Amino acid sequence: MRHIILSLILALSIQNINAQTENGFKAVEVLDSFEINPFTYFVDAPVLAAGDKNNYNAMTIGWGGMGTLWGRNRPVVTVYVAQKRFTHGFMEKSKYFTVMQFSDINVIQYMGKHSGRDGDKAKALGLNVAYTKNGTPYFKEADAVIECEIMYGAPFEEKNFRNDVPKKTYSNFPAGIHSMYFGEVVGAWKK
């Protein structure tokens, strides 16, 4: 699996920069120095986290996109979470989410194969959770973190499928249809 180090980020407040710097991260400008391929980023299976300081969950994701929406200078990350996934409930209740890049393949595999319903995945992996100034969970061991504010979220509807690709995908997909979430990038950090 390719290892892509992120070079992202948006201007942050001093408080937020200090919070991430304490955990070994450096803020970067996403619109000025974006060096990752948005078409391959999600092939490398980043980890998505949502929730708050009281309760959160994280999972590996393989579908997503990056671009702009509702304004030229509004960077957006789009993620998809199946409705039967434990993380889906956190995405529905949360205002923010994080997408994290890991070089440790064990983290990526474990987060994708185990459900938070069955136990604390971070604890099982020895990961240390931290929180952004917005209270969004991320892991100190990540190589890069993107924090997004959810602008829109909705489930796919079968009546809107225009060709056979989604129909075939969901005909044998046990986790059910996905919901999509557009998140405006509000911060990003890399080590």
Image (tube, helix red, strand yellow):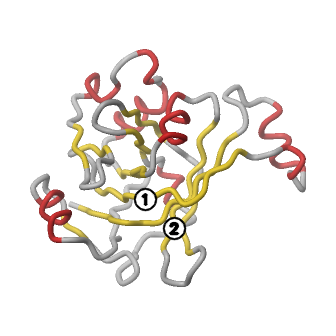
Give above or below for 78 relative to 107.
below
**Label 1: element kind:** strand
| Labels 1 and 2: the sequence-earlier one | 2
Q: Of the numbered discs in the image, which one, if any, rests on residue 13?
A: none
Identify residue type, mark 2.
Val
Q: Residue at x 49, y 40 (%)?
A: 93
Q: Residue at x 78, y 40 (%)?
A: 169
Residues packed near mark 2 inside 10 Å, few (<14), some (14 to 19) or many (20 plus): many
Q: Which residue is mark 2?
A: 76
Q: Which residue is mark 1?
A: 148
Q: Residue at x 15, y 64 (%)?
A: 15
Measured Cα–Cα span from mark 1 to mark 2: 8 Å
Q: How many marks?
A: 2
61 vs 56, nearest the viewer: 56
> Residue 167: x and y, percent?
85, 42
Residue nearer the viewer, 86 or 103: 86
Where residue 2 sits, quadrant-wise, is bottom left
What amino acid is found at the position of numbered circle 1 in the picture?
Cys
Q: Is residue 43 left or right of residue 190?
A: right
Residues tagged 1 and 2 counted as in contact (Cβ below 8 A)? yes
Residue in the foreground of this view, choosing between 138 and 174: 138
Query: Farthest residue toward the left?
Result: 22
* Other-residue count near label 1 (Cα within 10 Å), few / some / many at <14 / 14–19 / ≥20: many
Q: Position of residue 190 (x, y in %)?
A: 25, 62
Residue shown at 18% from the left, 66% from the top: 17
- How far across and how far down the image is residue 7, in percent? 33, 71
Relative to 150, 145 lies left or right: left
Circle 2: element type:
strand
In the rendered view of the protein, which quadrant contains the C terminus?
Answer: bottom left
